[in-house]
Amino acid sequence: MEIRILKNEAEIGAAAGKLYVDYINANPDCVLGFATGATPVPTYNFLVDEYNKGNVSFKGVKTFNLDEYCDLPKNHKNSYFTFMQENLFSRVDLNQNNVDFLDGNADPETESKRYAEAIKAKGGIDIQLLGIGRNGHIAFNEPSDKFTDEAWKVTLTQSTIDANSIYFDDIPMPHYAMTMGIGSIMRSKKIILIATGSSKAEAVKNMIKGEVTPQCPASVLQQHDDVVVFLDEAAAALL
Ligand code: GLP
């Protein structure tokens, strides 16, 4: 793992964003895996700025996303699909036909197979962006007894419900989600993980310095040979 500790979220957004701009310019038809949550927002803002300056185009880019809530309409204001539209997709020249998303309302097994085949058909994910949960989860792969493989339907833990329910002001937060599995994430050619703030420090320590265990799903990244981890000083405090 390459660890890059920077001062603040803005610096990380620019550094991670620059990596994307260079990659897209060199590989205009690339396949990118995106993530939701507060953490990647500065990176998305940087990408939108670069697009507005004419420094990058998303015309040929294909996208997949890590996860989506179950029992929530696709266009609900709190769906991850809406999040991506608002924070990145509708703000750049991405072709909406090139956007693929897990359907949290489909039959989980059928949807898992469909997603795996769609990723394979596009040649795999070139760069997968990740955040990390306070309990070490990646995407919605919560701590458990085994590492998962392809996409699956997960029951969210109380830690995740507590962290994310602040976004749900009209309806209770869903307790289930469809998530890319650990195997699907690990098959990405390159992984960029961003963690900011002191609430992530313990999970970051376990991810980088702890044993590789499904009890800290992010620890599996120690076994991937091309991972860049961007941290601010607070998230890196326990290293
Ligand atoms: C959610 C998402 C993850 C994300 C994590 C951290 O549960 N499923 O993909 O990395 O929360 O979110 P945040 O960046 O808001 O801290």
Image (cartoon, grey):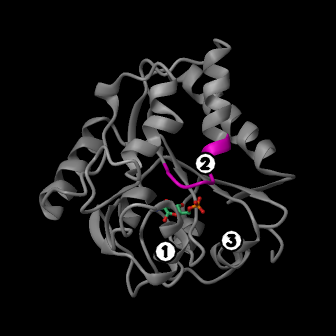
Q: Which of 5 and 44 lies nearest the eye of the viewer?
A: 44
According to the picture, the residue beneath numbered tag 1 turns out to be 160
Q: Residue 195: x, y in percent?
A: 68, 60
Q: Determine crowd level at label 3: few under 14, some 14-19, many 20+ residues with C-alpha closer than 10 A.
A: many
Badge 2 residue CB within 8 Å of ligand 1? yes
Type of residue at label 2?
A: Pro
On the image, which quarter does residue 183 sit in?
bottom left
Q: Residue 39: x, y in percent?
A: 63, 54
Sequence-first disc among 1 and 3: 1
Q: Secondary structure at mark 2?
A: loop
Residue at the (19%, 57%) spot, across then down: 105
Q: Which of 6 and 38 lies nearest the eye of the viewer?
A: 38
Sequence-first disc among 1 and 2: 2
Q: Which of 155 and 226 lies nearest the eye of the viewer?
A: 155
Badge 1 residue CB within 8 Å of ligand 1? yes
According to the picture, the residue beneath numbered tag 3 turns out to be 200
Q: CA distance from mark 2 to mark 3?
A: 14 Å
Per the rendered image, the range of residues in magenta is 35-42
Q: CA distance from mark 1 to mark 2?
A: 17 Å
Residue at the (71%, 42%) spot, across then down: 13
Q: CA distance from mark 1 to mark 3?
A: 13 Å
Q: Which mark is residue 149?
A: none
Sequence-first disc among 2 and 3: 2
Badge 3 residue CB within 8 Å of ligand 1? yes
Q: Residue furthest bottom?
A: 145
Q: Determine crowd level at label 2: few under 14, some 14-19, many 20+ residues with C-alpha closer than 10 A.
A: many
Q: Is residue 216 magenta?
A: no
Q: Residue 163: x, y in percent?
A: 55, 71
Q: Nearer the observer, disc 1 or disc 2?
A: 1
Contact? badges 1 and 3 (CB < 8 Å): no
